């Protein structure tokens, strides 16, 4: 498959400390690529670099044979849930069609039938057409999350990037949400960031682990060495309500000068 995102030897520092160090990552067409790692490990920052919202100190980012700025219209971005003001008095349909704003042209910048059709298609894909006329503040958290994603899909992206999309939804809603993403992968590439390892869908095709550096094996397995490199302490998952250790006890290692 053709690469749609390529990151080579990327470095980014803030206040004299590395946030991302020597990141090398290739994401190809129709992958469902999960980027996992602890809070503060640089996952969201990496997404913003790919989007062109943050400039790296060095290294290269290529999006579909262009720069992030040149190809931004091909990227759909769903930021973290808490960045939205759901008390704003708009309907679900108004919110979704606003995903077409970047495509409006001319001095009056009015939405066309093409824009409303794209919004309708996105709402149908996310199974929220029946909610289109409701105020955004009157629907549930899971329904709002689907509306946010529909907004991104309305722009007809080639790549959909999602930042912690299941943080504020319950288990059954998350399962339904991942089912929809798995269907979307037939037409677009999906890149999902999460700190919650236990929430990952079996339909994820590739997993990368980020904690300043990137740990990956090019497949969908979470391995002991990935977790040991990215997490400074033992990691446990919950299965049927019972925690079980997925990596062994290990000493906190010096990582970038920090313990």
Image: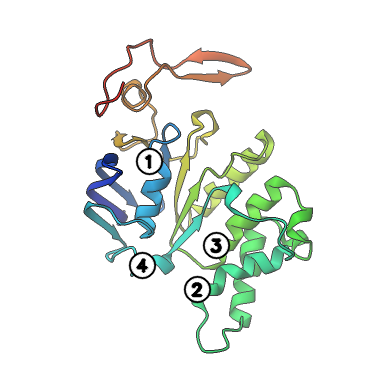
Check disc 1 and report the residue beneath it: 42
Check disc 2 and report the residue beneath it: 102
Q: Residue at x 25, y 44 (%)?
A: 24
Asked if one can make out residue 32 in the rendered structure from this viewpoint, the answer is no
Q: Residue at x 36, y 47 (%)?
A: 46
Whole-percent x and y of residue 223?
A: 36, 24
Inter-mark Cα distance, 1 to 2: 27 Å
Q: Please determine whether, in this image, residue 92 is positioned above or below residue 146.
A: below
Please give left or right for residue 182 compared with residue 256 in the image: right
Check disc 3 and report the residue beneath it: 153
State if disc 2 and disc 4 touch (CB < 8 Å): no
Mark 3 or mark 4, which is nearer the start of the sequence?
4
Inter-mark Cα distance, 1 to 4: 23 Å
Asked if one can make out residue 91 in the rendered structure from this viewpoint, the answer is yes
For this rendering, which residue is in front, 100 or 252?
Answer: 252
Q: Please determine whether, in this image, residue 9 is positioned above or below residue 212.
A: below
**Which of the two marks, 4 or 2, is nearer to us in this view?**
2
Whole-percent x and y of residue 241?
A: 63, 17
Q: Please determine whether, in this image, residue 56 is positioned above or below residue 98.
A: above
Q: Residue at x 41, y 33 (%)?
A: 37
Mark 2 or mark 1, which is nearer the start of the sequence?
1
Inter-mark Cα distance, 4 to 3: 16 Å
**Secondary structure at numbered mark 4:** loop
Check disc 4 and report the residue beneath it: 71
Label 4 crowd (10 A; few <14 / some 14-19 / many >=20)? some
């Amino acid at each position: 498959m053709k690469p749609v995102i390529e990151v080579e030897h990327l470095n980014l520092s803030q206040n004299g400390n590395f946030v991302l160090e020597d990141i090398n990552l290739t994401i190809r067409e129709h992958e469902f690529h999960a980027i996992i790692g602890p809070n503060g490990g640089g996952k969201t920052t990496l997404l913003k670099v790919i989007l062109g919202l943050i400039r790296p100190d060095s290294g290269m980012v290529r999006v579909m044979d262009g720069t992030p700025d040149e190809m931004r219209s091909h990227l759909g971005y769903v930021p973290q849930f808490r960045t939205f003001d759901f008390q704003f008095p708009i309907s679900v349909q108004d919110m979704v069609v606003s995903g077409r704003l970047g495509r409006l042209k001319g001095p009056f910048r009015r939405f066309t039938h093409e824009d409303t059709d794209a919004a309708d298609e996105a709402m149908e894909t996310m199974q929220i057409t029946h909610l289109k006329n409701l105020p955004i503040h009157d629907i549930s958290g899971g329904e709002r999350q689907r509306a946010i994603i529909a907004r991104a899909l309305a722009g007809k992206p080639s790549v959909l990037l999602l930042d912690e999309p299941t943080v504020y939804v319950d288990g059954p809603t998350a399962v339904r949400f991942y089912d929809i993403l798995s269907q979307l992968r037939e037409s677009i590439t999906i890149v999902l960031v999460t700190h919650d390892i236990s929430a990952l869908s079996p339909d994820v095709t590739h997993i990368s682990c980020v904690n300043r550096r990137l740990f990956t094996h090019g497949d969908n397995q979470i391995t002991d060495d990935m977790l040991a490199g990215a997490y400074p302490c033992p990691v446990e998952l919950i299965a049927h309500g019972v925690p079980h250790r997925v990596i062994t006890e290990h000493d906190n290692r010096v990582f970038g000068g920090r313990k």
